[in-house]
Image (cartoon, rainbow, N blue to C red):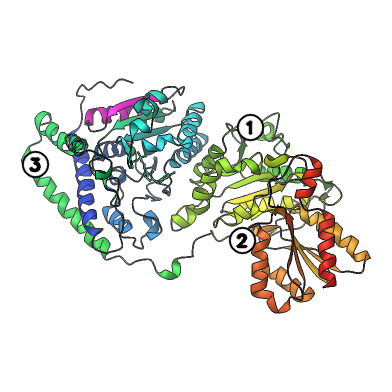
Amino acid sequence: MAISVSLTQIKKDLLLKTLEVMHLTRMMDEKMSKLVRQNKGATFHLAVTGHEMIGAVAALHLIPGTDWAYPYYRDRAFAIGLGCSMEDLFAAFLARDIPNHSGGRMMPEHFSQKNLRIPCQSSVVGSQFLQAVGMAQSIVFRGAAEVVYVSGGEGATSQGDFHEALNFSCIHRLPVIFVIQDNGWAISVPVEEQTAGGSIAPIAKGYDGLSVFEIDGCNFLEGNEACQKAVEKARRGEGPSIIVAHVPRIAPHSSSDDPKKYQEEACLEQGKGRDPIVLFEEWLTREQGVSKEEIEELKKHYFECVEAAARSSDEKPFPPKESAETKVYVPFHPPESKPEAAGESIVMMDAINHALVEEMERDAGVIVFGQDVAKGKGGVFGITRQLTEKFGERRCFNTPLAESTIVGLAIGLSSDGFHKPVAEIQFADYSWTGMNQLFNELSSIYYRSNGMWNCPVVIRMPYGGYIQGGPYHSQSTEAFLSHCSGLKVVIPSNAADAKRLLKTAIRDPNPVIFLEHKALYRQRLFAARREPGKEEFLEFGKANIVKEGKDVTVVAWGMTVLMANEAAEVLSKEGVSVEVIDLRTIVPLDFATILTSVQKTGKLLIAHEAARNGGFGAEIAARAVDEAFFFLDAPIQRVTGKNCPVPYCKALEDEVLPQKKDIEEAIRKLAAF
Ligand SMILES: Cc1ncc(C[n+]2csc(CCOP(=O)(O)OP(=O)(O)O)c2C)c(N)n1
Ligand SMILES: [Mg+2]
């Protein structure tokens, strides 16, 4: 879109405000580069130098506290322009204990401030885009006139998430303003090696409905006009825009970088020739009637403000070391469970569907989305059938075939507290393409923001084998998930538990991964149960003793609960009394129930379907050695999947996945020990 550089009526206070933000940002950089050498808590500095104009101008077009912002690490000018205090920014730089910007948990320039609607930012280049889009979707659902700003460097546009974000925001005409600050370098990689054609702007033009502005990010008029048009378009509900602002990077990538290793001297000189502050001041004096003396006076004042902010931030304490492991999970207790007369017998897939229906009826914020989940199909396993018909297209909708989109959207949608996303990943085997959003983002937002932001998200994933699904429809991923603090991991083994656990998950303010075993969806003999009532919940971290016994303890979850239960029946005929424990949730883990059982039986078998190496059984075994060593009368045994992908052919699959007879044999061995 062409920018007309004719001078419109620009108010002098806007010009001076822009000048102020640019200078404060530059002076902060100068101060920070000194502080980083003074051993005051800061070890790392990312200079904004060269980027000040576009960030400042963009911020001044937003309504602080109403609009939402996802600024990247080189966008301190935006943060200051929106209203972040310099004292806080210096304190964050020095890793001090303040409420905003993570309170020393994140490296500098990772913005997070609730009253300014800046959700917690991570270090992962590019993952902010989909979260911003999720927030924009929430705004549309709420019918609000808010807009979302998200920025990144040109390097970040090489990430798939960036393109997924453009795609989704265009499909749904969402109120997002993408600002790409293209400084020509991603650390040492020049844009010619980064982006086909050397600029993302012509590529972005391929997205239907996206307004594309390619501007000189050092030119006030171009930046001002592009921001104004993009914000107005978004506010009118007409959809997204992208502003590609070409800026110089006048400093090294960071204080750890030495551009002499990869840049010619001429390149740095060329950058300095495009310094946005110098150019802006020249323009202000030449064409806007601002005198040089006036600017000099203002600069003295700015300098004093920066020095004062740096001084007072240095008086703030460091976070106490006792706080290091706090705020990993939001404290939560489920509502009181009120058991009712048991209903009809139902299978697990119906129980999950009923839990969704009941929670969607109760809370208009509960929304369901994923691949194929909406009208007609209702998911490849039919779990979400009829939800669109019952609750409308806003409450149950399809996403593109992109798992990162699903998780990123869930983060954005849940961040304003209005929505409770219950997203479906079609198969756990395909969660990996969304894993960055899950592991690096969703799981740690509460911790990283020092308890300021949380994402109440449930992600349902069908998982597991025994259905001839081959290597990509059979995976059991619970051990990976359990390794990621901040997530809760739930694995029901029967219909009644599934319903009550899912209802608890939906009430939980933390991210919950809900693993549903495909082979149990329709299983009748063991997994079908009488339906619990609407007000029945199961607390996480409370294992179920499926069968009491005194000779051997078997710990299981998901499909192996059924197998262990059958094995216990067989063994009871041989005179061996087996206690079967269904963990129900592996995070949190009810180790107390395992311990009590092992104290009684002295013999522990752990049965799981996932591969043996690094499986969750290893964790339980290690803890049992630690905490129950003197009660153990035999070596701990594990029956697990082989260290091998799960093959398709039934004869091969049977070899790789643990079978009931394997559990029987292991129990016999233990009993005889
Ligand atoms: C996904 C990911 N990969 C690698 C990094 C390490 N890294 C941090 S900044 C950066 C370069 C980013 O360049 P660009 O997006 O152009 O922004 P700029 O720093 O130039 O403003 C890299 C590779 C990261 N943070 N995230
Ligand atoms: Mg760059």
SS class, disc 2: loop
Quickly name the residue at label 2: 333
SS class, disc 1: loop
- Mark closer to the chain start, 2 or 3: 3
In the rendered structure, which amino acid carries the disc numbered 2? His
Give left or right: position of 456 versus 581: left
- Crowdedness near tag 2: few (<14), some (14–19) or many (≥20) residues, C-alpha within 10 Å: few
- Looking at the image, which residue is at 48% across and 45% down? 416
Quickly name the residue at label 1: 392
- Mark closer to the chain start, 3 or 1: 3
- Which quadrant of the structure image shows residue 422? top right
- Crowdedness near tag 3: few (<14), some (14–19) or many (≥20) residues, C-alpha within 10 Å: few
C-alpha distance separating marks 3 and 1: 59 Å
- Which quadrant of the structure image shows residue 253? top left
In the rendered structure, which amino acid carries the disc numbered 1? Gly
C-alpha distance separating marks 1 and 2: 31 Å
Locate the N terminus by quadrant.
Answer: top left
Reply yes or no: does residue 471 show up in magenta. Answer: no
